[in-house]
Each structure stands twice: as C-alpha cells, then as structure tokens.
C-alpha cells in the first residue's frame, strides 16, 4: 500500500476533484454540444463518477495520519 504524506494527500485530493469536474463536464454538459440525442444513462453515469471522485477527494483530504 502506498503511504502518502499530508501534502501528497492534499495534491491527490485536489486532482481527483478536478477529474470529477472534467467527468461531469464531458458526460453531462458535453451532450448538449453533440448532435446525438440526450442520453440519460450517460448523464447518470457522469454524475455517478463525479460523486465517486468527490467522495474520494474528501476522504483523502480528511484522512488523519495514524
């Protein structure tokens, strides 16, 4: 298992949050820019990825050193 110090955990948490926003933008809002019809399945998947990444980001940021 990889052991990260506080600065490394903060950096990974920040980048996970950025990746969450990119996923939401691509899978939810990006559909409005395409010519294909809106897909609820893709939108729900995008929101699910966003929620997962945000939760992981908060968990990493809030983890205390044991």
Image (spheres, rainbow, N blue to C red):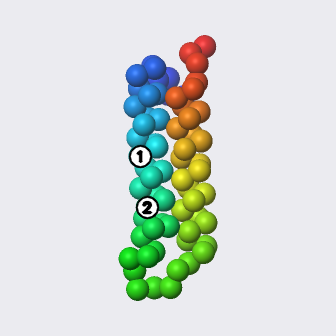
| Comes first in the chain, label 2 or label 1 | 1
**Residue occupying image coordinates x 54% and y 31%:** 60
Dot 2 and dot 1 residues touching (CB under 8 Å)? no
Instruction: Quadrant for residue 34, please give it.
Output: bottom left
Spot occupied by residue 50 in the image (x, y as percentages of width and height)? 54, 53
Q: Is residue 41 left or right of residue 22?
A: right
**Residue occupying image coordinates x 57% and y 26%:** 62
Measure how far apart labels 2 and 1 are at the Cα level: 11 Å
Spot occupied by residue 45 in the image (x, y as percentages of width and height)? 58, 64
Tell me the quarter of the image containing the C terminus. top right
**Residue occupying image coordinates x 50% and y 67%:** 28
Mark 1, other Cα within 10 Å: few <14 / some 14–19 / many ≥20? some
Spot occupied by residue 36 in the image (x, y as percentages of width and height)? 45, 85
Mark 2, other Cα within 10 Å: few <14 / some 14–19 / many ≥20? some
* Residue reaching furthest to the top: 66
Give the secondary structure at mark 1: helix
Q: Nearer the viewer, residue 31 or 11?
A: 31
**Residue occupying image coordinates x 61% and y 66%:** 44
Q: Is residue 40 left or right of residue 8?
A: right
Instruction: Quadrant for residue 29, please give it.
Output: bottom left
Say if 52 sits above or below 15 in the image. Answer: below
The number of discs equals 2
Say if 56 sits above or below 25 in the image. Answer: above
Instruction: Quadrant for residue 1, please give it.
Output: top right
- Name the residue tied to disc 1: 18
Spot occupied by residue 21 in the image (x, y as percentages of width and height)? 45, 52
Give the secondary structure at mark 2: helix
Q: Which mark is residue 50?
A: none
- Name the residue tied to disc 2: 25
């Amino acid at each position: 298992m990889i052991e990260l110090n506080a600065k490394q955990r903060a950096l990974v948490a920040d980048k996970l949050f950025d990746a969450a926003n990119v996923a939401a933008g691509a899978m939810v809002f990006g559909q409005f820019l395409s010519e294909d019809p809106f897909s609820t399945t893709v939108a729900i998947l995008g929101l699910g990825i966003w929620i997962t990444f945000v939760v992981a980001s908060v968990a990493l940021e809030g983890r205390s050193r044991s």
